[in-house]
């Protein structure tokens, strides 16, 4: 069971749980859309301080149409292993490279053949580096 005392109250919505993503149990907490960080396009984020994946309340994390839960899974697993970020800027750091490559691998398994056919991830400003991660997936 997820211990809610470590998650700031402002993030709670009546739904906090463990879910399974690619065979791994992940702690998630649903964040009301109005409490989501302003300007943050991604509907999910991993908090290493709280060791939980936050999910914006309007994102269907069960269907995960944009594979963001797969992306956050990598953040969670790397943190669990004690991996440290290399300090480079987002999204060129090693953690994001591994997470995006895994996320893109899932899209390829779902039949998406070209980077240009990806659904909008809200990352147009990082297209060049993400295209490289797509090629590596």
Image: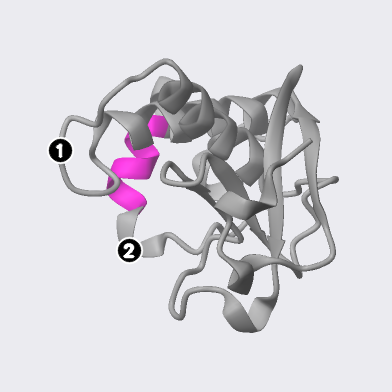
Residue lying farthest to the front in this orientation: 5
Query: In the figure, residue 55 lies in which quadrant?
Result: bottom right
At 17% from the left and 30% from the top, the residue drawn is 86
For this orientation, the residue located farthest to the bottom is: 34
How far from the left and from the top, in percent, is residue 74? 51, 28
| Camera-nearest label, 1 or 2 | 1
**37 left or right of 105?**
left
The circle on residue 118 is none
Say which residue appears at 52% left-offset and 31% top-offset: 76
Cα separation, mark 1 vs mark 2, equals 20 Å
Q: Which residues are magenta?
A: 127-133
| Residue 9 point in image, percent of width and height | 62, 69
Q: Nearer the viewer, residue 131 or 58?
A: 58
Q: Tell me the tag on residue 125.
A: 2
Query: Residue 100, percent across and down?
Result: 46, 35
137 within the magenta span: no
Graded by Cα atoms within 10 Å as few (under 14), some (14 to 19) or many (20 or more), the crowding at tag 1 reads few
Which residue in the protein does label 1 denote? Answer: 87
In the rendered structure, the answer to whether residue 120 lies left or right of residue 96 reads right
Q: Quadrant of residue 82?
A: top left
Quarter occupied by the N terminus = top right
Residue 70 position (above or below residue 109):
below
Instruction: Give the overall secondary structure of the magenta segment.
Output: helix
Q: Is residue 132 magenta?
A: yes
Q: Upstream in the sequence, badge 1 or badge 2?
A: 1
């Amino acid at each position: 069971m997820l211990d809610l005392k470590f998650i700031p109250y402002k993030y709670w919505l009546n739904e906090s749980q463990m879910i399974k993503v690619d065979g791994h149990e992940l702690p998630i907490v649903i964040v009301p859309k109005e409490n989501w960080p302003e300007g943050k396009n991604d509907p999910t984020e991993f908090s290493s301080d709280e060791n939980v994946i936050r999910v914006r309340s309007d994102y269907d994390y069960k269907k995960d149409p944009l594979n963001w839960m797969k992306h956050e899974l990598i953040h969670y697993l790397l943190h669990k292993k004690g991996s440290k970020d290399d300090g480079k800027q987002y999204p060129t750091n090693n953690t994001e490279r591994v997470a995006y490559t895994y996320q893109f691998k899932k899209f390829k398994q779902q039949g998406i053949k070209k980077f240009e056919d990806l659904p909008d991830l809200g990352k147009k400003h990082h297209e060049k580096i993400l295209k490289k991660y797509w090629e590596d997936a």
